[in-house]
Amino acid sequence: MRIWQAHTGPTRCLAISPDGQWIASGGDDQLIGLWGRDGSRLRWLTGHTDWIRSVAFGPTHERLASASWDDTVRVWHPGANRVLAFLDRHVGGAWSVAYAPDGSQLLTGAGDGTVRLGFMADIERQHPIHRIHHGPVSTVDFSPDGQLMATGSHDRCVRLFTSLGKPLLLLRPHSDWVRAVRFSPDGRYLASGSDDGLVVVSELPSGTPVLRLVGHQAPVTGVAFVPGGEQVVSVGWDGTARLWCLQSGRLLAAHAWQRGRLLSLAVAPDGMTAAAGAADGAIVVWDLDL
């Protein structure tokens, strides 16, 4: 386990590069940090003027997108500390961002419930998807094959779309705000985390809930499947990180590091480690092997 102080305020979001060598973090201090796996700081990316709410790497570590409550999304070349694209059409803050697996599209969610989709070749012509949420879009994700998109919102709903923005399913697996959605590596399941304290795993394409993982005593802020697809990780405001068996729903491990609320989660591509961002500004990296 490794813990280091990353931000002067809460660490709101995390992403791990596809090669597993970099961790990107965003905080209330308006900074994006780039870190080595050992906690060494590589550089700061500066320019946002409000909280950083979401960060996402593209298919290589040469592209990083960030969403901020300053109403903008920025696309960076992080190694060169250079902004490649600047998107300023979000209303109510830019809350969430995700790349398509091949890097060709960028999906963003805003505080006014709007979801926008753009092709990276012409990203500044990003278009809204007209089927919107009735609350901030706090989380977005692409399926591994890039054919589906999922969104979660404070309106307690999860929506699924095609990669062209056609609505497919409206799911209501939770009784409170949805803060996290993630596809499984094989695309068969979608996990969601909510302020109701539950992690719900729904089967696709039907959207039928097949697991309700009960254990968190506060809002669940991050969910992720471990590569291999047999386990689910979650973190929450109760300060715990939990590892679950996907087949049985059994809790395999739980950790508490006394860092206050855990606000963000990322799992390394090799499935060996995970990282959590904490309310005290720390990043915690721990081993997932049992």
Image (cartoon, grey):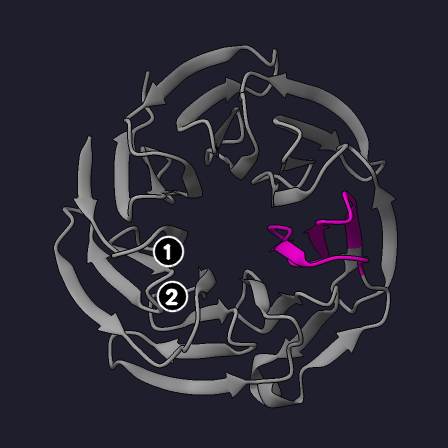
Element type at mark 1? loop
Q: CA distance from mark 1 to mark 2?
A: 6 Å
Q: Is residue 153 magenta?
A: yes
Residue denoted by label 1: 18
| Magenta span | 133-160
Q: Are marks 1 and 2 in contact (CB under 8 Å)?
A: yes
Q: Which residue does the image show at 79% across and 50% down from the upper left?
A: 159
For the image, the number of numbered tags is 2
- Label 2 sits on a secondary structure element that is loop
Answer few, some or many: residues within 10 Å of disc 2's Cα (few below 14, many 20 plus, some between 14 and 19): few
Of residue 250 and residue 143, the one placed in the foreground of this image is 250
Q: In what quadrant of the picture does the C terminus appear?
A: top left
Dot label at residue 122: none
Residue 99 visible within the image = no
Q: Quadrant of residue 258?
A: top left
Q: Amino acid at mark 1?
A: Pro
Is residue 111 visible in the rendered image? The answer is yes
Categorize mark 1 by other alpha carbons within 10 Å: few (<14), some (14-19), many (20+).
some
Q: Which residue is mark 2?
A: 60
> Along the horizontal axis of the image, is 184 left or right of 159?
left
Q: Residue at x 74, y 68 (%)?
A: 114
Image position of 220 (left or right of 178): left
* Three-letter residue code for mark 2: Thr
Residue 63 x, y percent position in the rendering: 40, 72
Q: Does the stretch in magenta take in 251?
A: no
Residue visible at 36% across and 69% down in the picture: 30
The answer to whether residue 38 is above or below residue 254 is below
Image quadrant of residue 47?
bottom left
Left or right: residue 16 compared with residue 185: left
| Rendered view: 49 above or below 208 | below
